[in-house]
């Protein structure tokens, strides 16, 4: 117990290490410019999963390009745009949900836009999410999924105290955070593959735990900004020059805890319906840990 508390505290203390961030070295990655393309990206197993009549993202954002990738199209995209060792990492991931995680980082790195799960509902047009989107000076938008206590983490409700949503991500192509997450997953995969795949390991390998950790490191190294600065966030927060963190109500409305307001609140932008599960629902876990995107 004491060891876990120590580790969790370390995550939220500013680091004095002289860390550095790798420069993007791969072909097919555009030079980063803080301008999120007007493009909506979704993935699912089959193309027939699309229901345009019910797709709120399409209806509320008619000027946005819409792209859907089924599993075979996603495989082709990764094979044609990524270095071979990234593609080999992708195809070797042991669970479909892990491939879905990895693909969203890859496709946003190459194409940019707004990735969102098939079971999400757009509550406000994308160009109203933050005022700065209209000035073409925004490169990365993420939302808080959890603003939890140490006890919540200890009992397994969440992987991290401050945890970022990954069912909806907005990013300009070539953003360094996306490069960091894609490369880091490839780096740890040989080691992770030696372990038995558990629900918690999925979170740490490709899911919101590693996603949060990579963003946390980027914030610390580049901006000396620890995640505890985001505790009890009430409004959009600019980190650096081009990254916006949205409060929990933005992408996680209706939780009735951690400061999350109803889906009717003016701050609510996306609702996640959790229409399918990828975990063992017989386990008594928070809905945040039990349910995820449909695959």
Image (tube, rainbow, N blue to C red):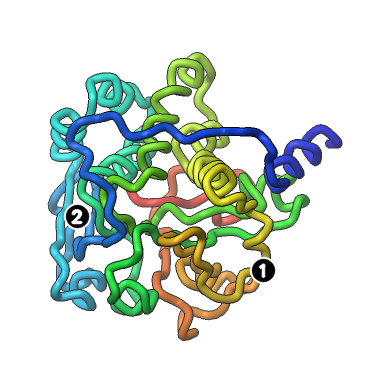
Tell me, for residue 292, which label it has, or none. Answer: none
- What is the quadrant of residue 149 in the picture? bottom right
Q: Looking at the picture, does residue 275 appear above or below residue 27?
A: below
254 left or right of 25 in image: right
- Are discs 2 and 1 less than 8 Å apart at CB? no
Q: Residue at x 56, y 46 (%)?
A: 216
Q: Residue 272: percent from the left, percent from the top?
A: 42, 64
Q: Quadrant of the C terminus?
A: top left
272 left or right of 34 in image: right
Q: Residue at x 22, y 43 (%)?
A: 110
Q: Residue 1: percent from the left, percent from the top?
A: 83, 36
Tell me, for residue 232, which label it has, or none. Answer: 1
- What is the quadrant of residue 176 in the picture? top left
On the question of residue 280 being in view, the answer is no
User: In this rendering, which labeled residue sits more in front, label 2 or label 1?
Assistant: 1
Q: Residue 280: percent from the left, percent from the top?
A: 52, 41
| Residue matched to label 2 | 49
Tag count: 2
Mark 1 packing: few (<14 Cα in 10 Å), some, or many (20+)? some
Q: Residue at x 15, y 61 (%)?
A: 66
Q: Residue 36: percent from the left, percent from the top?
A: 27, 61
Q: Looking at the picture, does residue 112 appear above or below residue 110?
A: below
- Element class at badge 2: helix
Residue 225 or 43: which is nearer the viewer? Answer: 225
Residue 220 or 158: which is nearer the viewer? Answer: 220
Residue at far right of view:
2
Q: CA distance from mark 2 to mark 1?
A: 37 Å
64 left or right of 144 in image: left
- Element class at badge 1: loop
Mark 2 or mark 1: whose residue is earlier in sequence:
2
Q: Looking at the picture, does residue 137 appear above or below residue 32?
A: below
């Amino acid at each position: 117990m004491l060891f876990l508390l120590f580790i969790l505290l370390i995550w939220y203390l500013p680091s004095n290490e002289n860390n550095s961030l790798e420069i993007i070295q791969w072909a097919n990655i555009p030079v980063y410019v803080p301008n999120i393309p007007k493009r909506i990206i979704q993935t699912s197993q089959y193309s027939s999963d699309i229901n345009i009549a019910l797709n709120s993202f399409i209806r509320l954002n008619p000027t946005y390009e819409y792209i859907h990738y089924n599993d075979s199209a996603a495989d082709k995209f990764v094979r044609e745009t990524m270095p071979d060792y990234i593609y080999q990492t992708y195809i070797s991931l042991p669970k479909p949900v892990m491939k879905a995680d990895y693909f969203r980082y890859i496709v946003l790195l190459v194409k940019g836009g707004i990735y969102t799960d098939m079971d999400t509902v757009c509550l406000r047009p994308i160009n109203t999410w933050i005022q700065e989107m209209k000035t073409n000076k925004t490169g990365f938008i993420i939302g808080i999924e959890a603003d939890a206590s140490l006890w919540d983490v200890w009992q397994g409700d969440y992987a991290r105290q401050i945890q970022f949503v990954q069912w909806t991500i907005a990013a300009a192509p070539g953003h360094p955070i996306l490069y960091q997450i894609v490369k880091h997953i490839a780096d740890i995969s040989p080691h992770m593959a030696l372990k038995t795949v558990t629900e918690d390991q999925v979170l740490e390998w490709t899911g919101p735990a590693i996603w949060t950790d990579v963003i946390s490191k980027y914030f610390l190294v580049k901006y000396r900004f620890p995640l505890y600065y985001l505790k009890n966030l009430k409004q959009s927060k600019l980190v650096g020059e081009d990254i916006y963190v949205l409060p929990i109500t933005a992408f996680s409305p209706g939780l009735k805890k951690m400061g999350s307001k109803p889906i009717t609140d003016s701050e609510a932008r996306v609702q996640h319906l959790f229409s399918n599960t990828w975990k063992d629902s017989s386990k008594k876990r928070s809905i945040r840990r039990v349910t995820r995107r449909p695959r």
